[in-house]
């Protein structure tokens, strides 16, 4: 449990005022963690303010429909205000909600999600799935910048594109936090920082790895020094050459993560779910909601390396996975083979374009889809034509989920269950699972 903060806490962000200091009563919270207040009838968004608070703020952006204000002083804090665990919270753009107690973050996200899905669900219907609030990220892309000989290693800022230099990040998995510190010290000691685009940290069942994206080539001597560092730290090292789309990775250096009794292999730059324990819970929930049986042929759209396809295939008659990246499709096929599953087939296809594949001609009973933020609108008519009895939609963007689900409902489906999955605590991101059933 994090410490509640004392009253009259002053915000650390420096006001760049255009208006006078005014007192606001905050009664709402946006998805991006801005407090919502009304001043003389006009909505004002105040970054860092929480519902129930009385604050002093200065309007720094005046618009026709709403103003934005900078928090100056908290006169009466919310009972749910807590001390952020990270000292850089006010400036780093990585997290938005560290000043709000964990259980209230979930409530705020639930309110927001209900608003997004207002045409689809009623208040009682939103279920919740959560896990530990800190130390959950198993992968992170770290930005790097050298300015006037000073190195900044961290994430982009809240208010600017500037890189905020950090020494620790509380949402990273503990092993990634410790490698981050060692990496920072090592980068300060040699010449690599000047030729790095970014650094990728990753932890999976195989261990910890660090990937350097190079912007120009480096000497063998420098590379060897880093290989020595990696050996000392017991991490795997990957190099993405300048202008290369991905790092070249030898088969024995491919990564893997375990999912209950399955082992899934992947390239260190392939998509995998960021939160390992929430992923386990999410996949288990998907299996429980969709309950595939030997009568089911399941289509897994946007399947990646088979995160849902393989668990589905353990219960279904067969599974067809579709994914745009050929290399991930190959990894998914290999994952099926290595895990002894012979009832899966995978298709490489771009689901924003018409897909003409023989595999879709068989009777598909259930569809699972887990698209990127843009959603899956272009493929919805194909799903409707396939006519599965159930559709399980996993979404990282509630507004495209709402758009797509409203379309499916208009075309003969109804929403059975919805769950808010807290995959990214402390941040404003929301993951949702929705089960739709074909109307009789
Ligand atoms: C949110 S990830 C989900 C992956 C997988 N279901 C998992 O749980 O690991 C979305 C996946 O869709 C793939 N993808 C993105 N755009 C696509 C498209 N237009 N057609 C097919 N797949 C696409 C990505 O490569 C990525 O693997």
Image: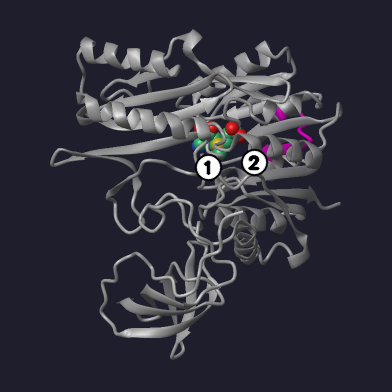
Q: Quadrant of ligand 1?
A: top right
Which region shows up in magenta?
Answer: 361-368
Q: Dot 1 surroundings within 10 Å: few (below 14), some, or many (20 or more)?
A: few
Q: Position of residue 18 (x, y in %)?
A: 25, 79
Q: How far is the residue under mark 1 from the one under mark 2?
A: 18 Å
Q: Which residue is disc 1 drawn over?
A: 372
Question: Is residue 43 depicted above or below 161 in this figure?
Answer: below
Tell whether position 365 is magenta: yes
Q: Are marks 1 and 2 in contact (CB under 8 Å)?
A: no
Q: Residue at x 81, y 33 (%)?
A: 292
Q: Viewer-proximal residue, 188 or 145?
A: 188
Q: Position of residue 283 (x, y in %)?
A: 70, 36
Q: Position of residue 354 (x, y in %)?
A: 55, 37
Q: Position of residue 256 (x, y in %)?
A: 57, 20
Which quadrant of the figure has residue 392?
top right
In which quadrant is the N terminus drawn? bottom right
Q: Is residue 201 left or right of residue 328?
A: left
Tell whether position 405 is magenta: no
Q: Which residue is disc 2 drawn over?
A: 382
């Amino acid at each position: 449990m994090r410490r509640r903060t004392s009253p009259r806490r002053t915000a650390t962000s420096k006001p760049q005022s255009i208006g006078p200091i005014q007192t606001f009563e905050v009664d709402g919270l946006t998805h991006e963690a801005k407090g919502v207040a009304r001043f003389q009838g006009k909505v004002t968004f105040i970054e860092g303010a929480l519902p129930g608070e009385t604050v002093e703020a200065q309007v720094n952006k005046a618009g026709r429909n709403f103003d934005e204000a900078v928090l100056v002083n908290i006169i009466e804090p919310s009972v749910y205000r807590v001390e952020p665990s990270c000292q850089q919270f006010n400036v780093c753009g990585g997290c938005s909600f560290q000043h709000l107690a964990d259980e209230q973050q979930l409530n705020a996200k639930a309110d927001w999600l209900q608003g997004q899905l207002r045409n689809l669900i009623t208040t009682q219907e939103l279920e919740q799935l959560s896990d530990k609030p800190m130390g959950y990220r198993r992968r992170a892309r770290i930005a790097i910048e050298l300015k006037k000989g000073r190195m900044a290693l961290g994430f982009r800022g809240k208010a600017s594109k500037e890189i905020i230099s950090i020494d620790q990040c509380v949402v990273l998995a503990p092993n990634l936090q410790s490698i981050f510190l060692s990496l920072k010290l090592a980068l300060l000691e040699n010449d690599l920082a000047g030729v790095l685009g970014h650094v990728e940290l990753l932890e999976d069942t195989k261990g910890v790895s660090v990937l350097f994206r190079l912007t120009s080539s480096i000497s063998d001597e420098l590379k060897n020094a880093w290989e020595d560092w990696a050996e000392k730290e017991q991490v795997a090292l990957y190099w993405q050459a300048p202008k290369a789309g991905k790092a070249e990775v030898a088969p024995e250096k491919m990564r893997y993560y375990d999912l209950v009794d399955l082992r899934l292999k992947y390239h260190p730059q392939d998509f995998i779910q960021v939160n390992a324990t929430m992923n386990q819970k999410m996949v288990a929930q998907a299996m429980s909601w969709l309950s595939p049986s030997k009568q089911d042929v399941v289509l897994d759209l946007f399947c990646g390396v088979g995160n849902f396809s393989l668990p589905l295939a353990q219960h279904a008659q067969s599974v067809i996975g579709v994914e745009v990246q050929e290399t991930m499709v190959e990894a998914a096929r290999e994952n099926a083979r290595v895990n002894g599953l012979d009832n899966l087939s995978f298709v490489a296809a771009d689901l924003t374009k018409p897909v003409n594949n023989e595999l879709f001609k068989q009777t598909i009973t259930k569809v699972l889809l887990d698209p990127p933020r843009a959603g899956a609108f272009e493929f919805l008519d194909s799903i409707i034509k396939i006519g599965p009895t159930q559709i399980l939609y996993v979404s990282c963007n509630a507004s495209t989920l709402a758009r797509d689900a409203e379309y499916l409902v208009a075309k003969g489906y109804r929403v059975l269950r919805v769950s808010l999955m807290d995959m990214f605590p402390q941040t404003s991101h929301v993951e949702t699972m929705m089960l739709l059933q074909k109307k009789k």
